[in-house]
Amino acid sequence: MSKNILICGVGGQGTVLAAKLVSQAAVRKGEAVLSAETIGMAQRGGSVTSHVRIGSDAYSPLIPKGLADIIIAFEAAEAVRNLDYLKKDGMVIVNAKVVQPVTASLTGKTFSEDEMISALKDRTPNVTCVDTDKACAELGSPKIVNTLLLGAACRTGIISMNAIEEAIKLMVKPAFQELNIKALHYN
């Protein structure tokens, strides 16, 4: 039975690396993996969505709507935008911080974290919010949001913590491995 993991956020947050870590972790466990990224205007803070499908019964890298077991959202509004992918009893791991899109400054329309989190909880009961700002401040780096969210996803049991840690050792520069492993295990 396949696992379908959708990772979403905006450009520059580390979503693509997170997807590669999840994929590498599955490969290290001997599982078949298909993945694809939709990057778009990522360099300018645009939407980034990565699909990771683990298991021999996945025949396409893109997750059909309504079949994602988990959404790992680096930004709350992106979680809301991608919620149609989540299966009925799926889980959402979400960064509590909202990144206002460029269009918000142009139109004067903004939205709050509370609005986005409330919209998520109205549509699915399985929402875990991660205060990445607090964790980044405690661990001393703003560049670990991806491993903080992966750690929260690992605690759901859908992804192996040990396999992600091994993937970090393979894919992250040695100077940043210890920090990322601390972030992975941050509660």
Image: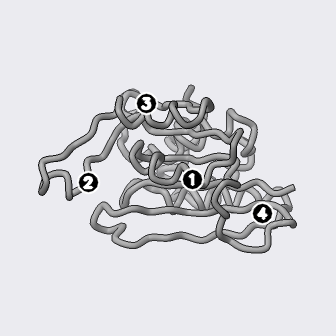
Residue 172: percent from left, percent from top: 54, 57
Q: Distance between the residues labelled 1 and 3?
A: 16 Å
Residue 25: percent from left, percent from top: 72, 56
Q: Nearer the viewer, residue 80 or 129?
A: 80
Chain-order first, disc 4 or disc 2: 4
Which residue is drawn at the image coordinates 60% and 38% (left, top)?
A: 151
User: Which mark's residue is nearer the viewer, 1 or 2?
Assistant: 1
User: Which mark's residue is nearer the viewer, 3 or 2?
Assistant: 3
Q: Of the residues shown, which amino acid type is indicated by label 2? A: Pro
Q: Nearer the viewer, residue 89 or 38?
A: 89
Q: Which residue carries the number 3 mark?
A: 118
Q: Which residue carries the number 2 mark?
A: 101
* Kind of element beneath mark 3: helix
Chain-order first, disc 3 or disc 2: 2
Q: How far apart are marks 4 and 2 (CA)?
A: 35 Å
Q: Of the residues shown, which amino acid type is indicated by label 1? A: Asp
Q: Which residue carries the number 1 mark?
A: 84
* Kind of element beneath mark 1: helix
Q: In this view, does 110 lie above or below 186?
A: below
Q: Of the residues shown, which amino acid type is indicated by label 3? A: Ser
Q: How far apart are marks 1 and 2 (CA)?
A: 20 Å
User: Which image quadrant for residue 85?
Assistant: bottom right
Chain-order first, disc 4 or disc 1: 4
Disc 2 crowd rating (10 Å Cα; few below 14, some 14-19, many 20+) is some
Residue 141: percent from left, percent from top: 37, 40
Residue 27 got which mark? 4
User: Which mark's residue is nearer the viewer, 4 or 2?
Assistant: 2
